[in-house]
Amino acid sequence: MKKTPPDELRPARRTFLKAAAGFMGSTLLGGVPFRAFAQATNLAPPDRCFVFVYFAGGWDQLLAFDPRDPDEFTPDRVTETRILPGYSLLSTDTRFQTRPLIPAEKSGVGRSNIAFGPAVGRLADHYDLMTVVRGINMTTLGHEVGYRYFLTGKQPNGSAARGSSTATEIVGQMKPTVPIASIAYNIESYNDRYGGYANALRVSGLNDLVLTLSPSTRQLDSDIEKQLIDFNGQPISCEEAAYGARGVGTTYENSRGQMGAVMANKLSDAFKFQTATEAGGLLDFYGLRNQAFPFNSAAGRAATVATALKKGISQCVSINLTGGLDTHFGTQLTHASNLRVGFDALALLVDDLRRTSHPGGGNFMDHTTIMVFSEFARTPLINSQGGRDHHLCSSCMLMGAGVKHNYVFGRSGDIGMAPGTFDLRTGAADPNGTNIFPEHVIATVLASANLDYSITRVDPLRPILA
């Protein structure tokens, strides 16, 4: 029996109408008519690209970006330090060291100033592009709240997001001349202050993306959809008059034209990896050959991100790269293994962007800023079920263009890994200073591209800026 990939198990509701709805607005290009753009035969990558990478479930920072020396934080000191690295619990799997990782020194770069947890693996070799921010106070232990807080840089109202996603803010200000300015791959996206050109195209998988960008051969799903297709500004019923009063019909008609241009330009072909002429090299580079559903994997999602950027299709890609991290009852090895899946995929993406020349000079990582985050961290103590619970103090990682490289900003406390307080102008620890919050990181990302960060209502972490 033929196996059905996960994306195809969902009802096939991605009609032309639904694809167009993802682009509601008069233009996708901030004033450049999309039809004119779509006639171009060559797509040019933007000078500055952004990737927002989400690790779902709340990651263990002792295994990731905020490790501790197990010779210092020993089991017999747990009552004093309230920190137990637990690295010895990984010893049955040869993929993991039982100590923090210190990458080998690179010629011309010097030694790493960043220590990494055992789960980071080969991604640590890219330390020369990274800033790690430690000791971030997430102010919440709720999954949805922490997730949406880091997406927008604003504390949610209850669990409801406030403000626009950072990718939306970037696209809203920069108005890039690319076909699909922002893609949100299995991740939420918000737009509360820009026109439709700044909306992200939200997809839940590669099949979803290809289907959305491909000409539809399906029948319309409802009479309402047919009415919207036929509606040209002349109300023929009370219902259509209501559409017109709200501007839905006009907005949809414009969006429908834009979506038609996307399809005419055959952008979907770029993501048909199994049939594309360069698919062989891509399958081999990302280790996807002979996998049943290769592009549903974390490595496959990373390949999708690289394609969107390198082919000049998108400026911003936000992606849920890995999950399975809410391991209250799991083992350290389970959590480390799930983290490693995401970090290995991210390492491949960075490898790909570093090896690929950018038309503006240098390689793609010289023109790309990556932010890696989770909704919060795990407790520094292991619970009675062998897992770790939710913890306020987290870390994140920035890398690439616009940020300092081989640098650590902030730290968590040596007792219970509590959030630290700092003079944010210098990064120095200061008992009378301020916590680091997600909005500081978002302001820094915006400032790294010389964008207006005033919407965050805080200053960027200036020592991080390149």
Image (tube, rainbow, N blue to C red):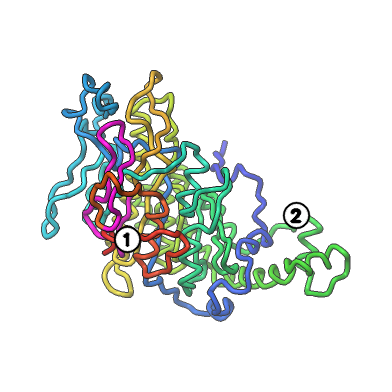
> Residue 285: in sight, yes or no?
no
Toward the viewer: 322 or 64?
64
Tell me where residue 231 sits by quadrant.
Answer: bottom right
| Image mark for residue 25 | none
Above or below 7: residue 33: below
Disc 2 target residue: 221
Q: Which residues are magenta?
A: 397-425
> Residue 167: in sight, yes or no?
yes
Disc 1 target residue: 353
Mark 1 Cα shell of 10 Å, populated few (<14), some (14-19), many (≥20): many
Tell me where residue 261 sits by quadrant.
Answer: bottom right
Q: How many marks?
A: 2
Toward the viewer: 414 or 208?
414
Q: Position of residue 199 (x, y in %)?
A: 56, 63
Mark 1 or 2, nearer chain start:
2
Q: Position of residue 404 (x, y in %)?
A: 25, 60
Name the amino acid, label 2.
Asp
The residue that appears at 79% across and 59% down in the rendered structure is 224
Toward the viewer: 176 or 452?
452
The residue that appears at 33% across and 67% down in the rendered structure is 367
Above or below 245: residue 422: above
Distance of label 1 from label 2 (alpha carbons): 40 Å
| The N terminus lies in quadrant | top right
Q: Position of residue 422 (x, y in %)?
A: 28, 49
Q: Secondary structure at mark 2?
A: loop
Q: Is residue 413 magenta?
A: yes
Residues at discs 1 and 2 in contact (Cβ within 8 Å): no
Q: Position of residue 54 (x, y in %)?
A: 43, 47
| The C terminus lies in quadrant | bottom left
